[in-house]
Image (spheres, rainbow, N blue to C red):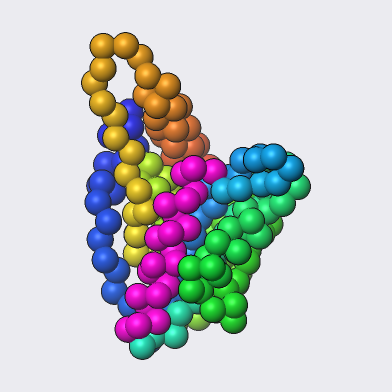
Amino acid sequence: MLNLAQQGFDQTITPDFAPKTDIVLMGGGTDREGTGLIPKADSIPRIAAAAKLYRECRASGASCRLILSGGDPQNHGQAEADNYAPYVLAQGVAPGDLIRENQSLNTYQNARNVAAILGDAHDSELIVITSAYHMRRSLAAFDAFGYRPQAYVSDVRHNSVTLLPRFRSFENSELAAHELVGMARFEVYRWLRLY
């Protein structure tokens, strides 16, 4: 199932930057640690990839913005975008180039709310950063709003064949099932014109 969810996105391809480039980091959740919140383990590679890509974009001479997209779907008391912001700022993202979309609760809302920020002009290059297993659904969501972003895969999950079941394998199966069901639901909603 994991291979099916990640099919076509098993490697990171360096994107092309345009004179105006918008980079969207898709939220991946938060975890409680002590009395605070930290990005989920899956979000750390996304955050690092977003900061790296932003720095490369700026080095190319382009005008670059980083949009952090993610509300508080887990009801932890802080939006993912707000939680991730200090991490990308610490890795070299200029505060003036950072936009927080902190209201979305799912992938479709991520795309809808980012599309509202970008507007109808479509005059900049759009790059979406997320994990391989989440990329297909993310691109489909942006497609629903007329955007054809470049995919930038932050990380790829791998399964290993083992004699005894491992927690990581169960976790991978759950993630893959969530994405495959989510993609199927998305297609049905599109067919019904709900999306």
Judged left or right of residue 150, residue 101 is right
Report if residue 24 lies within the magenta region: no
Name which quarter of the figure residue 76 lies in. Answer: top right
Pick the front one: 147 or 90: 90
Judged left or right of residue 183, residue 1 is left
Query: Do we see residue 113 in this rendering?
Result: no
> Residue 155 appears at what percent x and percent y?
35, 48
Pick the front one: 158 or 34: 34
Above or below, comparing residue 86 to residue 106 in the picture: below
Identity of the residue drawn at 59% across and 81% down: 96
Q: What is the span of residues highlighted in magenta in the rendered image? A: 40-60
Query: Do we see residue 102 in this rendering?
Result: yes
Q: Residue furthest top?
A: 164
Name which quarter of the figure residue 23 lies in. Answer: bottom left
Report if residue 45 lies within the magenta region: yes
Pick the front one: 165 or 190: 165
> Residue 152 appears at what percent x and percent y?
35, 59
> Residue 177 appears at what percent x and percent y?
43, 29
> Residue 47 appears at what percent x and percent y?
47, 58
Q: How many marks?
A: 0
Identity of the residue drawn at 44% across and 37% down: 179
Identity of the residue drawn at 29% across and 74% down: 16
The image quadrant where one finds the N terminus is top left
Identity of the residue drawn at 58% across and 58% down: 84
